[in-house]
Amino acid sequence: MCGICGELRFDQSSPDTAVIRRMSEKLARRGPDHEGLISDGPLAFGHRRLAIIDLSPSGDQPMVDKELRLSLVFNGTIYNYKELRQELSEMGYTFFSEGDSEVILKGYHAWGEKCVERFYGMFAFAVWDMRHTNLFLARDRFGIKPLYYSLDGASLRFASSVQALLAAGGVDTSIDPIALHHYFTLHAVVPAPRTILNGVKKLPPATTMTVSTEGQFTQRTYWSLDATRPAHNLSEQDWLNATRAVLNRAVERHRLASDVPVGVLLSGGLDSSLLVGLLADHVDDLLTFSVGFEDVGEGAEKADEFEYSDQVVERFKTRHHKYLIPNAEVLKRLPEAVSNMAEPMVGQDAVAFYLLGERVADEVKVVLSGQGADEVFGGYFWYPRMDEATGSALDRFRLNYFDRDHAEYLETVAPAWHVPDVTAELVERELTKPKADCFLDQVLRFDATTLVVDDPVKRVDNMTMAWGLEARVPFLDHELVELAARMPPSLKLKEGGKFPLKAIARGVIPDAVIDRPKGYFPVPALKYVRGEFLEFMRKILMSDACIKRGLYQRTYVEKLLAEPEAHFTRIQGSKLWQLALLELWLQLNVDNG
């Protein structure tokens, strides 16, 4: 719901408020409703507000509680804030506002660093504790809300975007070769704490960090995902009943925590259509939004899913908004979209969400989205392939997911960025962590706790918040994810994947939507790179800036430019777009930032 930033000095000086203002300006699009800044000795906070809960000035931030000697900047939503407020009131706390922000302040005072374990929601926040002169940073269980930071010997700075940190100055913008290996192997995913830049880190999901004015750090992981079977066997119907109950509760939480109308991003797929079905009886005049793109011709998939979203609209009589965006606009707006990416995001739908978010933000401030359902309930085509494969856990994952093997990575980038196969090491380490009963449990847990964070969920938050639009993801309610993680993978993969959701959806949404082939929110022009899009990418990769940077092996670039549609990743992305996107992001945000 907001953009946050701040600085804590370690050298007994005070932060330069001009620096905080520069950071805040880069976050203005995330929070167009109010700007705030405070300074207290070695600490300064900046905040840009998107007003969703308690629309009055009492909900503005930075929020200061003079009695408790605490101040806060917060991005996100605490869905159970009303229940926690009641509990805190019974403990003797009094409130001066009506929103969830103050609940965080009181909760931190009451429960200390363990307050995050009580919060249901998506959040990144910072609390300045004037009593103990330390800074407390926290990020939600799935990293739905971003929190980047940079460190030097004199201070820590943090912000909701990389661009805000770069605006502060003094950041090491050299490329991290390990992050680069992850980027080109894991479909642009760079797991925390790394980013593509050496001087910028991100707080991992489900993590808190306490920082003293002497520069001492304490980091704690407060939640992990158990992917083992429960002690008592449950029948298929038991699992379905439990899923229905928990999903209904999650959707209701996400709907009710708002003092403004809530819409739905309706792709025409199972997940978003099911959200509409579950909301329809509770919301009068439900707003829904769909986007489609122009086809690119022979051999490419259809560029919209209106055939299915229209059926959902007809069933539930929603107040629907349908947008068809021509490729000329996609091409024209690509640099703008990329310049707003906190990190390079190669998924085709990043640009789709950016262009959709612009239009939706004219109608509502909050939408629900179906992201996370595929990772949690086994909806992607590569899960059955991994399940049927043989070999080690790493090999079964690598051969069905990695964008390129290590040898091709060495062929992609110049020798200065060559490293060992660090992505294979990371994946093997994650898959073999305890509390997973079988290989697919390991894979789905890794997806839900790592890959989803830095791929679809990051794209949705970043691209919608660029327009002051908050996207909520009920399928990443942590109680729902915990339930699904303990469910037998065979039940999730039944009938082509996401069987529990399909079963719940029967009789609620049209069967044609449930039984349709899975779609992937396509922007075909970024997959089947032809015509003006090919020339656009050629210009980027043959630019003086790209050649001078020396990041790519030129023979590899020339090979991709010669036959762009001969080089797809294992999960059907364009390898050419991967290279062009990263170079364009660096030019827009680092070279010209």
Image (cartoon, rainbow, N blue to C red):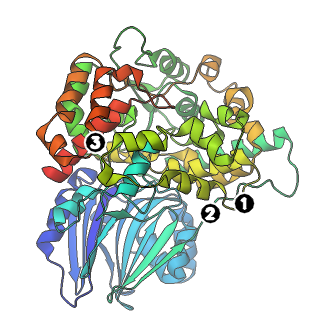
- Frontmost residue, 364 versus 150: 150
Quarter where residue 298 is shown: top left
* Residue 35: image location, x then y, percent: 20, 62
* Residue 74: image location, x then y, percent: 37, 65
* Residue 451: image location, x then y, percent: 51, 48
Residue under numbered circle 1: 435
Q: Which mark is residue 529?
A: none
Is 574 placed above or below 393 here?
Answer: above
Nearest-to-viewer mark from 1 and 2: 1
- Frontmost residue, 538 versus 366: 538
The residues bearing labels 1 and 2 have C-alpha atoms spaced at a distance of 10 Å
Callouts 3 and 2 close, C-beta under 8 Å: no
Nearest-to-viewer mark from 3 and 1: 3
Residue under numbered circle 3: 552
Callouts 1 and 2 close, C-beta under 8 Å: yes
Is 106 placed above or below 258 here?
Answer: below
Measuring 37% from the left and 51% from the top, which residue is drawn there? 180
